[in-house]
Amino acid sequence: MTQLALPLVSAAQFAADDFIVSRSNQQAHGWIQRWPRWPASALALTGPPRSGKTHLVEIWRKSAGAWRLEGPQLQAQLHACLEAGGCGAVEQFEQADERALFHLLEHARLHGGALLLTSALPPDSWRFLLADVRSRLNALPKAVLEEPDEALLEALLIKLLSDRQLTVPPEVAAFLARRMERSFAAAEALVDALDAASLQRGRDITTALAREVLLSFFAGSGLILDGVE
């Protein structure tokens, strides 16, 4: 059997218990939990960068015993994927060769396999030229990860800071979540800034320090909302 030459992903980074569920992602999380009771042979999972797509892929892979690759790899790995059969995940599938994607979708449909396809683009931004590919993708059930709500932002800030061995009181996380842009990119940028400020000043991350960071580092960047002062 041809072996799939796939990138290694540390499962320790993507434990099921580490996925923070909130209103903004519970629909997508529910689809993954519903496996193997999917109504079709493939599921499209969409969401902005850093929203948890790979985390959900890894949770599903553990349940389904699935292989995983990136869309640009599909053409070169198609034969190996078809031989492996079973379940597989294709991330950034909108970057895959269309004919290879069509063959993979058909193989899963005809042979009882299952595919999890992920993309940072919403369905109305997919640009596939082959009508057969478009029709099959349009017919798929779709799970959507939205930008984080306030509750998820609070939990995410605490987790990202904890990953850096930094502790932040819940009231500080709440202060930040109410005032920053609600996006995963903003959360990561803010954590970088808080980490640097805490190290530079030799101070714990308090509400006062959080306010300083929001006012100075992010001023004019478009990554915060009004009401910091």
Image (cartoon, grey):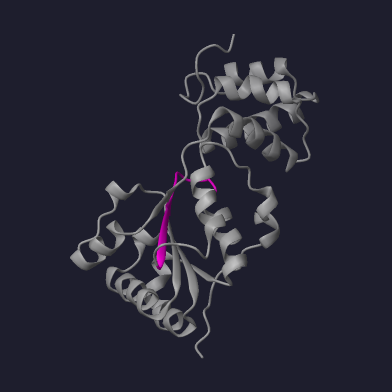
Relative to 79, say whether 95 is above or below.
above
Q: Is residue 114 above or below residue 30?
A: below
Residue 168 % position (x, y): 75, 28
Residue at the farthest top position? 229
> Residue 14, located in which quarter of the rendered image?
bottom right
Residue at x 63% of width, y 43% of height? 20
Depth check: 106 or 186 in front?
A: 106
Report the residue at 53% width, 31% height from top: 149
Q: Quadrant of the C terminus?
A: top right
Instruction: Residue at 63% x, 37% y: name it.
Output: 156
Asked whether the viewer can see residue 130, the reply is no
Please count the marks in the image: 0
Most distant residue in the bottom direction = 1
Indicate left or right for 206 with 1 as reference.
right
Q: Is residue 98 above or below residue 119?
A: below
Q: Is residue 210 left or right of residue 48?
A: right
**What residue appears at the point 40 percent right and 65 percent down from the top-left corner?**
42
Where in the figure is residue 84, as x and y percent of width and height? 49, 82
- Boundaries of the magenta span: 41-52
- Where residue 211 sits in the image (x, y, percent)? 65, 16
Q: Residue 51 magenta-drawn? A: yes
Asked whether residue 102 is in view, the answer is yes
Q: Is residue 80 magenta?
A: no
Quick one: 220 or 165, which is closer to the camera? 165
Left/right of residue 120 with respect to residue 29 in the rendered view: left
Whole-percent x and y of residue 210? 67, 20
Say if 186 sits above or below 219 in the image.
below
Quadrant of res 167: top right
